[in-house]
Amino acid sequence: MERNKSIDFYRFAFCLPVILLHISVSTTLYDERFTLGGNAVEFFFVLSGFLLGKYIKKADEKNIFVSALNKTKRQIIHIFPYYYLCLFATLFYRIYINIKFDSYGEQDWVQFINNFVAELLCITGITYRTRHINGPDWYVSALIIASFLVTIFVMAIKRYIKKWEYVCEALSIFIFVIYIQFFDLASKYGNIVRAIVNIMIGITCYIIYANIEKKYEKKIPIIIYDIIDIVAVSFCIMCLFPNNLIEEKRIIALASGILIINQFIGKSHFSKFLDSNISLFLGRISLPIYLGHLLVILKFANNPRYDMTQWKVQSYLAIVAASILIGIIIDLIITLVSCKLKKKQWDYPISIRKVAFIISMLLFIISFANEKVFFKFDNLGK
């Protein structure tokens, strides 16, 4: 299975609702339309489960623990450079603004330090906490822990049950239904439960995809794939709007699974259109955007002298643009360091000219908004 560029585009697209949610709840720019943006994370969990399904199907189940450990090592090697760079950058900035504005008491600092240790050890995905350092860290923690546990569980099924795929599908559906009906029971350990359920759904999606690819791919008209794309995307973008169906039933997870299957089949006109190096680039920067955007929000939101409410649209635009910009910068840093350590030539999905053009455009957008919103010139002489 080659890297799917249309999926890379959706990695980037599903970051945006999360950013809008965090801007809304972390600043004075509260907007009810963005309160369900966090449900977009279902896409990333389901996608991880889909890729995990591919790994499990090809893995040797004779040594289950080693196979699960190897898969976890790959995730860590890919994610942790971004994770720790964003964690420490946000840590230092939080310390700076908390001291500058004297916003923390003694108990707040104790909790702050405890949370930093938990985030440093990447164990925050198990339970919810406040006074976090870098909010999206829970996703990384829940993803790694849940992926490890699910890999062991599903590979054990594969070893002892001949028709393991059918059993896995049935279990995924059963777990998902229980998750929907008794969602409140999972509130204390909501992060890890959410990750496990959606990763199981993703594995089922891969099993379905593998069967379609073998038996039905050429028999289904392209128009059907186009319709599936439209319907799945329509459900997915509903995470941008308050809706009881999406909020209570977590339909976004199922819509994400259908969308992922359709993109990997790659027959729809839209998936072919998205098959470009620009999509590959956007997918590449999605992780650093997701992990680094809280630092940007802190920069814009924690100075009481900033009046963001006066220019609401421009404020949202500036913070999103700055989040994309910091994602590009973080990815360039990690790529450069990686190439130096491995003594490899610079390898990037798009040319430096295009990267420079994108950075220039983002800086222009941010500067335009800042001129009205984020800078106040009380003393032009100074």
Image (cartoon, grey):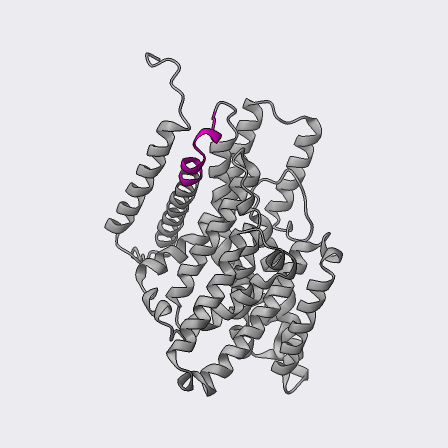
Bounds of the magenta segment: 306-317
Left or right for 133, reference 272: right
Q: Name the residue located 47 percent from the left edge and 87 percent from the top edge.
A: 215
Q: Is residue 273 magenta?
A: no
Q: Is residue 332 left or right of residue 294?
A: left
**Main secondary structure type of the part rendered in magenta:** helix
Tell me the residue at 65%/72% (across/down).
Answer: 172
Up/down of 360 relative to 75, above or below: above
Q: Where is residue 5 in the image (x, y as percent from the top left)?
A: 37, 65
Locate the C terminus by quadrant.
Answer: top left
Question: Residue 25 placed where, x, y %?
Answer: 57, 40
Q: How many labels does the image show?
A: 0
As for residue 308 lying within the magenta part, the answer is: yes
Q: In this view, does 149 lie above or below 377?
A: below
Viewer can see residue 133: yes
The quarter of the picture where the N terminus appears is bottom left
Whole-percent x, y for residue 56 in the image: 56, 75
* Point 49% across, 80% down: residue: 210
Front-lying residue, 287 or 310: 310
Q: Residue furthest left?
A: 353
